[in-house]
Image (cartoon, grey):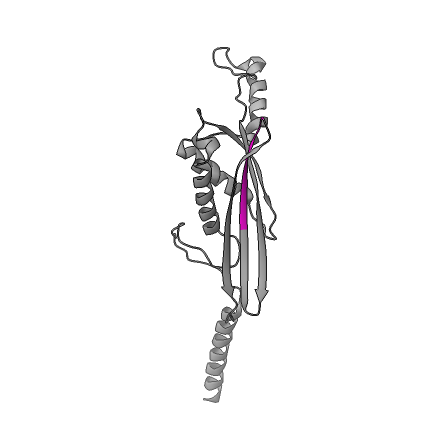
Amino acid sequence: MNSIMSKCFLVSLLASSSLWLSACGPKAFTKGEYDDVQRENLLDDKWSETDMQSSVKELVGSLGGSQPIANARKKPIVMVTGLQNKTSEEIETQSIMDMIKVELTNSGRVNFIDREARQDISDEYEYQNSGMVGDESKKGPGGQIGADFILNGRLESITKTIGKDKTVYYKLTLNLTNLKTSVIEWAGQKEMRKLFKKRSVGL
């Protein structure tokens, strides 16, 4: 009887230990569902898609209604040269500028030159003039359209922590520069500040 009880106790102990080790082991996200990308994301104190969406919407509205865009006789040709990341976070600023390009292009007010595609275009010119492409369809240098404006900017942040309170301030600034005169003909900025409270996180 004692032997049977000992075996039962041992099995129970092993089962309990297994459950305890399982509970204390590494966790993984094993089940997910689609979420509304327009819903606010404040899961942490980092730059989020919500910040990007609200910033882009406001700045695109301001730029689209500005004098050099709204009063242009023909669609201005714009080239994006980059967005500086002056924050302490690793932020993919290209995503911000891509969203701006998409919104402005779809508005029908602006055309963009793809700066990143220049090398690809040059390579294609070389290929088409190699004799592999018929004269009736090949393209060549000399027909491209020059940009009227350059769009660039800077993303900055200030973080402050006092006790259990933390604030994160972001400022996104964009400049539209006339390529011929080098005059900044439009500048816009979007500011936001988010407040977070520290709390204990249980196991």
Along the line of sight, the residue nearer the viewer: 64 or 144: 64
Along the line of sight, the residue nearer the viewer: 63 or 55: 63
Residue 113 shows in this picture: no
Along the line of sight, the residue nearer the viewer: 79 or 138: 79
Q: Which quadrant does the N terminus fall into?
A: bottom left
Please provide the residue range marked out in magenta.
171-180
Quadrant of the image occupied by residue 72: top left
Residue 172 within the segment the image draws in magenta: yes
Looking at the picture, does residue 22 appear above or below residue 155?
below
Query: Residue drawn 53% across and 17% down?
Result: 143
Q: x, y (%) of residue 35?
A: 39, 53
Q: In the image, is 133 to the left or to the right of 106?
A: right
Looking at the picture, does residue 70 appear above or below residue 51?
above
Query: Residue drawn 44% across and 48% down?
Result: 54
Q: x, y (%) of residue 69?
A: 46, 32
Residue 39 shows in this picture: yes
Query: Dominant secondary structure of the magenta stretch?
Result: strand
Q: Residue furthest bottom?
A: 2
Query: Residue drawn 41% across and 34% down?
Result: 106
Q: In the image, is 90 to the left or to the right of 9?
A: right
Quadrant of the image occupied by residue 130: top right
Q: x, y (%) of residue 19?
A: 48, 72
| Count of all numbered marks drawn on residues in the image | 0
Looking at the picture, does residue 105 appear above or below residue 189?
above
Residue 57 within the segment the image draws in magenta: no
Q: x, y (%) of residue 36?
A: 38, 51
